[in-house]
Image (cartoon, rainbow, N blue to C red):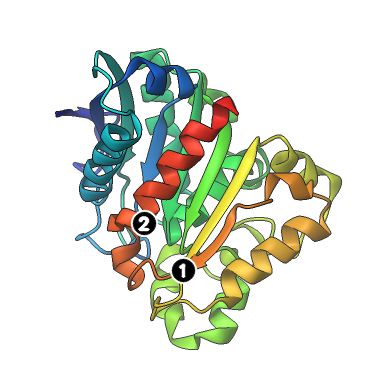
Amino acid sequence: MIESRLYAYGKDSIRQVYKEYTLKVSQSTKNAIKYPICFIHGGAWRDPKNDYNDYEKLIRYIDNAFLVKGNAESRSAKIQFFSIDYRLSPEVRHPKHLTDALQCLKSISKKFDVTDVTLCGHSVGATLITQILERQKILKEYGVPEEQFEPLPNIRRVMFLDGIYDVNSLLREYPSYNSFVGEAFKDNDYVSKCNMISSGTKSQEAAGIYNALERIVILHSSRDQLLSFQQPEEFVNWLLEIGVDESKLKGCYWIDDFGKHNEVYQSPKVADLLVDDIISRTK
């Protein structure tokens, strides 16, 4: 049985909400989970059809997978997942998507006493994860005080689902995508102020950010009709070039048939991989 409840973290838009999911699991599964997963939806920063409900089906698959892997143990314990929503373009532009996500994580941290999380993002939700990790640099560039988003939970692990990482590379490969990138960023801000890979940054600062993670999981569907393998391949290469420990990526780069682009975040295969990743934390 899954219980869910909606919470607001802001007053500027009906999109400034997140959904909390409570799952009943076996005690052994509960012991294996050090921290909850926060999901971030995609939708090119602008599609109103994508929201906090995007991961509903995936979470149900996860619940079923826990039941199978729990070996019929009594489901007497509880775990929490969260699904984050944020304001869309053209109503707002970067860095508002990021500041909304940070404000949401702050609310989760305070309301539920969450100190550590795994982030899971699809498409531009993956872009947002890189921005959350690199927030100090981005917020400074826009003159936004980082202190207003404290306390934030520590980001321990990340999972990217058919993500957009390097926006410059994306537009070279798909020039027509400037239609939504141009709505999300002022002028050419995506060149230098989106994230480190988009600006070509290769520094100790970048290495330190990603080496601080326990694990970096990158999934990409072989049937994704909107993004080629170029995005994940360039991201993996960039991580290695900046000096990220290969062990953080070992066995964590998956290319498989997870469905079309907007089917990935509802894939039972992805749910199984998520559950295996969670349980592996005790090994």
Location of the N terminus by quadrant is top left
Q: Amino acid at mark 2?
A: Lys
Q: Which residue is mark 1?
A: 256
User: Residue 267 in the image: x percent, y percent?
Assistant: 31, 58
Q: State which quarter of the image contains the C terminus.
A: top right
Residue 169, quarter of picture: bottom right
Of residues 41 and 100, the one drawn nearer to the viewer in this rendering:
41
Residue nearest the viewer, comparing 22 with 91:
22
* On screen, residue 152 above or below 174: above
Label 1 close to label 2 by CB (< 8 Å): yes
Task: State which tag comes first along the sequence, 1 or 2.
Answer: 1
Residue 15 in the image: above or below residue 70? below
Q: Does residue 175 appear to the left or right of 67 in the view shown?
A: right
Residue 110 in the image: above or below residue 39: above
Local crowd size for mark 2, using a 10 Å CA cut-off: few (<14), some (14–19), many (≥20)? some
Q: Secondary structure at mark 1?
A: strand
In percent of width and height, residue 113 lies at 41, 12
Q: Circle 1: is it few (<14), some (14-19), or many (20+) Cα within 10 Å?
A: few
Q: Which residue is at 50% across, 21% downward?
A: 34
User: Which of the labelled discs sits on residue 269, or is there none?
Assistant: 2
Residue 71 horizontal/vertical position (percent): 31, 29
Query: Residue, x 58% and y 31% (percent of image)?
Result: 156
Q: Position of residue 204 (x, y in %)?
A: 85, 45
Horizontally, residue 236 falls left or right of residue 186, namely right
The answer to whether any part of residue 99 appears in the image is: no
Q: CA distance from mark 1 to mark 2?
A: 9 Å
